Amino acid sequence: MKKFSFFLSATLAASVVAHAQTDTITLTRQLDEVIINAPVAQVTNNHTALTHEQLNQSNTGQNLPFLLSATPALVATSDDGLGVGYTYFRIRGTDHTRINMTLNDVPLNDSESQTVFWVNMTDMASSMSSLNVQRGVGTSTNGSASFGASINMSTASPLASNLSPLTSSVGLSFNGGMYNTFREMVNAHIVLPNQWRANARFSKVNSDGFLYRTASDLYSYYGDLGWYGDKTEVVGRFFGGSEKTGMGWDGVDYNTAYGINGADRRYNPAGEYTTTAADGSDSTAYYPNQTDNYAQQHAQLSILHRFTPQWSLSATAHYTHGAGYYEQYKRKKLSYWGLPYSHKAYGMYRKQLDNHFFGGVVAAKYISEPVDVQFGGAANYYMGDHFGTLHYLEDSLILPINYEYYRNDAKKTDANIYAKAKYRLITSSPHRLTLYADLQYRYVRYERNGMNDEDMTDLPLEVNFHFFNPKAGLTYQNRGHLLAASFAIANREPSRNNYKENVLYDASTGEYIGLPHAERLYDYELGYTYSHPRFAIGANLYFMDYDNQLVLTGEYNDVGAYKTKNVKDSYRMGAELTAGVKITNWLRWDGNLVASRNKILNYHQYIDLYDDQDNWNWVGQDSVVGTTTIAFSPTITASSLFTFDVAGFTATVQTNVVSKQYLDNTQDENAMLRAYSTTNLNLQYRLPMQQWCKKDNAPDLRLLCQINNIFNAKYANNGGAEASKFMDGSRCCWYYAQAGINVHAGFVIRF
């Protein structure tokens, strides 16, 4: 079965979802004529556009990265093994901290960690009207630079296509499945007098998780109220959520992750400790509150005014507040908590944060037949407090209640201005030749004060960055043919973790040791697509040349955040192939295949050598020198999607293939993720309610069943490795096991 699944995927995959590519072209022309808040990606071959219905086709409670799993070059990962708790993704091997994400033009990436934690706003896809993925360096967006891709999302009236946005409606959705996974969602679209409209949604998601003690207790909400005049629109949005999740970021060994020799793949070591009974016998126990807890609230106010059919101006003010903590029970050296002792003891401690993010975004746009011009900018400010408290210590020391062992705060200013234009050199039908250019200046100031929670030393920091990010391209369209070429430069500042895990500060001299450098990317893209009423094909070639790329080392800290370091010269290059065909009126196939080469030049890393895993006696060092493969960068990713649609019944079969990935940059076969293939089956049936009720306003009712990993593949999609190895060549690695076959079923009804 597993061999058949892998063969099916590798044979049929061939790249980007064809109907999504077709929608991209149509959607972009519509957006040229009607301005909306979401930034629009340039019409190119490295762009995927998804509608509300496509996003939610298989939405049974997994977070957004898993709903995007058919996107070319995207690999989704999860801590809990199901994709309900903490989930992440990489595109073209680039991790989520360097993928720019915006929602209604507003930066969504956290200013310090530079990622988006989807678990904080579970089921956000239910409130999205559209989502655009631009691989490589896309057009200018607000927030951190895009080094692997940019994802631009918009919220509006996410109604099913058969319902009018001018009619009020209410929707309910429920599904339940394995590992006690349940999702309940209610939403409403309300048409009010005098051109007012409102949307509201509340979602609740619970799951035990595939791994033991990785349960998720999540909720999220979304609401907007808008006035839509002939020339002016004003919309206020409020959304957010809260999460409590069991920790699953410690990982497990190779045999456990892959179920070798009957190992329990659901094993989770987080919170594990040993107790001694009165008779002297030892037993294993687990701390019951080894959890992560966080809540986040967002507010946006957007105004759009059309002065003429050509000129428009939009502005958005925003505010985000987040606060929470994670709690752990671990055996540590007392010096870890800033205490002047080197012996070990169990302690229960919390690392907490409280942050605020606010600012504004403005854009003006002029549209005419020969030329489109857009210019604008943004200014954002972030304040974050980080502190740790020790609540219990298995030691004779007397400590104050809720002893605070570290505190640091950070401030970040992020501002940019940009101008971009498209000039149509040839507009005579059927030919269309367009030249575009995009210039952006970005200023970043990051300040940090207080104690570093990695080594309990002071780490004052004040850095400023001035980035110039130019982009240019050319597209040619003729009777379904699209040829595009582009060149872009992107610059990106280091994240909070890049600083706190690599920098040593000498207070006596005021010097910094190990200060990370900003990254620079030169991105070259060349692509071709052909769209026909029955089929579509495409190919995109890319070469991403990096200067001082911050690559993952495979190591992580005690909260599962991966460590990085600069490498001077590195590159990613590849070919993204796309194909789709409408086989019959009721059957179509879409697929993608990405082949890539991801290398570090002149790499040098020292690795500690130990005798064996029982004694851990240090015996020296080994070194890796030369050209190596970048960690977590598969050579092949592929996706195949069959869609069967007849008489209200829809079935999709989606297969994803990911080749092997190295856990660090040493290209060591003893530190890698095995290649894997998964196949998901989605079944839906829309009941003929109008026929049964004999009226046009009958409710719309769909029944659905989602079966993930139907061939029960035993796989891991993430992991890490210590920068050490043993004399026999083995490595100390950890892996994140993912669930085997799991089934979820439910219904969606809209009145």
Image (spheres, grey):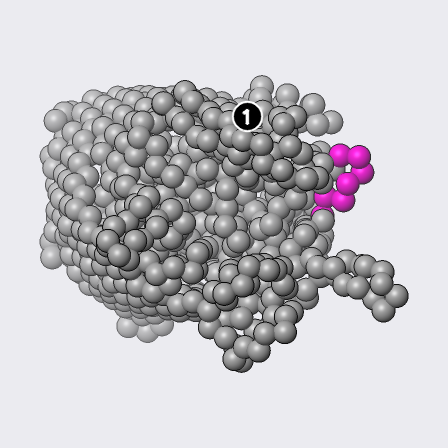
Which of the two residues, 155 or 635, is positioned nearer the viewer here?
A: 635
Is residue 655 toward the left or the right of residue 465 in the image? right
Q: Relative to 230, is 688 above or below? A: above
Residue 330 as seen in the image, left or right of residue 711:
left
Residue 184 in percent (x, y) is at: 60, 63
Q: Is residue 584 visible?
A: no
Q: Where is residue 458 in the image (x, y as percent from the top left)?
A: 34, 61
- Relative to the observer, which residue lies in front, 361 or 354? 354
Q: Which of 34 and 556 is in front in this view?
A: 556
Residue type of the residue flagged with mark 1: Asp
Where residue 260 sits, quadrant-wise, is: top right
Q: How many labels does the image show?
A: 1
Q: Tell me, yes or no, if residue 715 can be seen here.
A: yes
Q: Which residue is drawn at 61% across and 60% down?
A: 344
420 is within the stretch colored magenta: no
Residue at position x 63%, y 70% in the image: 395
In this figure, which residue is indicated by the disc labeled 1? 668
The magenta segment is: 260-266
Residue at the extreme right of the image, as rendered: 279
Q: Position of residue 320 (x, y in %)?
A: 35, 66
